[in-house]
């Protein structure tokens, strides 16, 4: 039984009328109960032994105004119950609609086997008057909703419908209005996992947290930078890109990460220079910072091997070292400022960082309006495991961001909305954390930065006293 529950509800051909069947049976039962309760006194006072429904009776049941009122009242109660059930049991209602849609999908696409039988109706001795379709094979498909995720599992039998059942992504996303999170092929079945009601999984900036090498950005979306390093962010003006980057900076400072921020346009991120170090906006300073970041990565890689508790295969976190993040806003705009020689030098350093940074704990976050392949070529784009595209982009922009994928992208006028690939090659809808009105990034980031600097100073003083 537990195994069955884990699979979920079996989708059957009869589920094509699941919503009507459930509604009719539930409301009919409620209607009868209410009518009986309202007429309980009349029913109790009736001598049912003298009532004969199939012949003349000395007792006659008459329809009274009260009985009519009770029926109307029962109908109103049923209507109110239906509205309340839809309001407070919304997920259960959606599950019924989802299961009905899945059954109709199989039936309308003809992914089943049937045979035609003769139907003689109620009288078996009479010649057959009509033909009836009898389903002899219906694919085994199971549905369950858990923690805001839809799990749809279908059996793969090497039959004639195998190809269709192995490629249900687009039908499920558009038909159920959900976003695919993962698709896993296992022994004899394939399981699709989709986010249901994605916007409900949006979190506030206070809920964003970094721990154990992961950064939480939605209820069920984490950037596991220790395992899948480097982030690429694309988005035009007004899409929420700057607030998203500031949110990331604030969250990473809470876990004592070392931050380097580059803003070649001297815009909002450059204002952080008033409250924290390592903020650069001049061309020469930016290139110098990239050199410094690269040199620091190489130096740490060497020093890690000399530590007493160094262990092959373990990373910087195992040795108790802090992660370093280089946040590079308007990357493409900066690269277009450089000469060909300067461009090649910067690109070479960035390639080394994305290739070698994970083990040493040096991570790169690039942001741009559109990820031009001119500056993200030679496989460097593929090294950015976590990719976010905010606001509406062109088909070319999406292909630059995610590669050639069979995915329909929809526009919703919601600031901070976009699409994300968390490193699994599955693209799903994404919402940046909500920032409440009046939230002061400079003040909060300044407080966190000062706390970090004070902690570093205390550690240096303690080390000097020990010496």
Image (cartoon, rainbow, N blue to C red):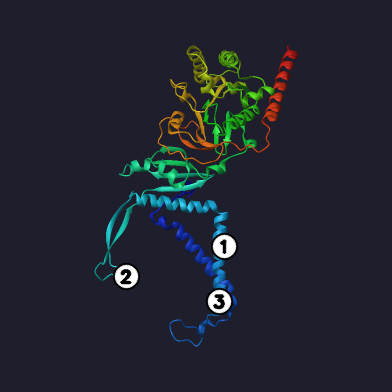
Q: Dot 3: what SS?
A: helix
- Provide the residue designation for mark 1: 80
Alpha carbons under labels 1 and 3: distance apart: 20 Å
Give x and y (percent) for residue 249. 62, 28
- Provide the residue designation for mark 3: 67
Alpha carbons under labels 1 and 2: distance apart: 39 Å
Q: Is residue 204 above or below residue 459?
A: below
Give x and y (percent) for residue 118. 26, 63
Tell me the residue at 50%/66% (across/down): 28
- The foreground one among 181 and 178 is 178
Tag 2 near tag 3, CB within 8 Å: no
Give the mark nearer the N terminus: 2 vs 3: 3
Instruction: Give the number of marks.
Output: 3
- The foreground one among 12 and 232 is 232
Give x and y (percent) for residue 330. 55, 24
Alpha carbons under labels 2 and 3: distance apart: 36 Å
- The foreground one among 231 and 194 is 231
Q: Which mark is residue 122?
A: 2
Give x and y (percent) for residue 56. 45, 87
* Category of crowding for the residue at label 1, using alpha-carbon neighbours closer than 10 angstroms: few (below 14), some (14–19), many (at least 20): few
Tag 1 near tag 3, CB within 8 Å: no
Mark 1 vs mark 2, foreground winner is 1
* Category of crowding for the residue at label 3, using alpha-carbon neighbours closer than 10 angstroms: few (below 14), some (14–19), many (at least 20): some
> Which quadrant: the C terminus?
top right
* 391 displayed left or right of 184: right
Q: Which mark is residue 101?
A: none
Q: Is residue 442 above or below residue 94?
A: above
Give the mark nearer the N terminus: 1 vs 2: 1
Give the mark nearer the N terminus: 1 vs 3: 3
* 219 displayed left or right of 348: right
Q: Dot 1: what SS?
A: helix
* Category of crowding for the residue at label 2, using alpha-carbon neighbours closer than 10 angstroms: few (below 14), some (14–19), many (at least 20): few
């Amino acid at each position: 039984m537990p195994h069955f529950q884990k699979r979920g509800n079996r989708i059957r051909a009869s589920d094509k009328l699941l919503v009507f069947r459930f509604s009719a049976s539930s409301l009919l039962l409620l209607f009868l109960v209410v009518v009986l309760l309202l007429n309980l006194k009349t029913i109790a006072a009736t001598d049912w032994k003298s009532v004969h429904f199939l012949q003349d009776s000395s007792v006659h049941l008459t329809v009274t105004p009260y009985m009519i009122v009770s029926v109307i009242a029962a109908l109103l109660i049923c209507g109110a119950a239906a509205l309340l059930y839809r309001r407070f049991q919304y997920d259960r209602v959606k599950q019924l609609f989802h299961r009905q849609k899945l059954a109709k999908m199989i039936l309308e696409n003809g992914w089943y086997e049937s045979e035609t039988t003769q139907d003689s109706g109620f009288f078996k001795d009479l010649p057959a008057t009509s033909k009836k379709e009898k389903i002899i094979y219906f694919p085994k498909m199971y549905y369950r909703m858990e923690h805001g995720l839809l799990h749809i599992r279908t059996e793969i039998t090497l039959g004639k419908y195998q190809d269709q059942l192995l490629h249900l992504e687009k039908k499920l996303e558009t038909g159920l209005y959900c976003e695919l999170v993962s698709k896993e092929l296992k022994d004899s079945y394939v399981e699709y996992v989709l986010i249901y009601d994605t916007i409900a999984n949006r979190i506030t900036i206070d809920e964003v947290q970094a721990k154990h090498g992961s950064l939480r950005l939605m209820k069920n979306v984490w950037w596991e930078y220790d395992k899948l390093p480097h982030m690429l962010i694309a988005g035009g003006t007004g899409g929420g890109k700057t607030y998203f980057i500031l949110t990331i900076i604030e969250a990473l400072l809470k876990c004592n990460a070392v931050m380097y921020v580059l803003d070649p346009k001297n815009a909002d991120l450059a204002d952080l220079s008033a409250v924290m170090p390592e903020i650069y906006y001049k061309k020469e300073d930016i290139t110098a910072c990239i050199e410094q970041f690269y040199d620091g990565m190489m130096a740490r890689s060497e020093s890690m091997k000399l530590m007493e508790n160094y262990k092959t295969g373990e990373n910087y976190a195992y040795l108790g070292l802090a992660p370093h993040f280089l946040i590079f806003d308007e990357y493409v705009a900066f690269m277009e400022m450089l000469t060909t020689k300067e461009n090649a030098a910067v690109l070479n350093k960035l390639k080394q960082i994305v290739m070698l940074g994970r083990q040493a704990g040096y991570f790169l976050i690039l942001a741009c309006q559109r990820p031009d392949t001119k500056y993200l070529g030679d496989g460097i784009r593929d090294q950015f495991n976590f990719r976010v595209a905010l606001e509406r982009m062109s088909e070319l922009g999406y292909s630059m961001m995610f590669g050639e994928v069979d995915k329909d992208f929809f526009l919703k006028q919601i600031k901070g909305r976009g699409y994300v690939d968390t490193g699994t090659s599955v693209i799903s809808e994404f919402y940046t954390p909500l920032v409440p009105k009046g939230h002061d990034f400079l003040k909060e980031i300044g407080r966190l930065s000062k706390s970090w600097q004070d902690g570093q100073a205390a550690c240096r003083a303690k080390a000097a006293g020990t010496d």
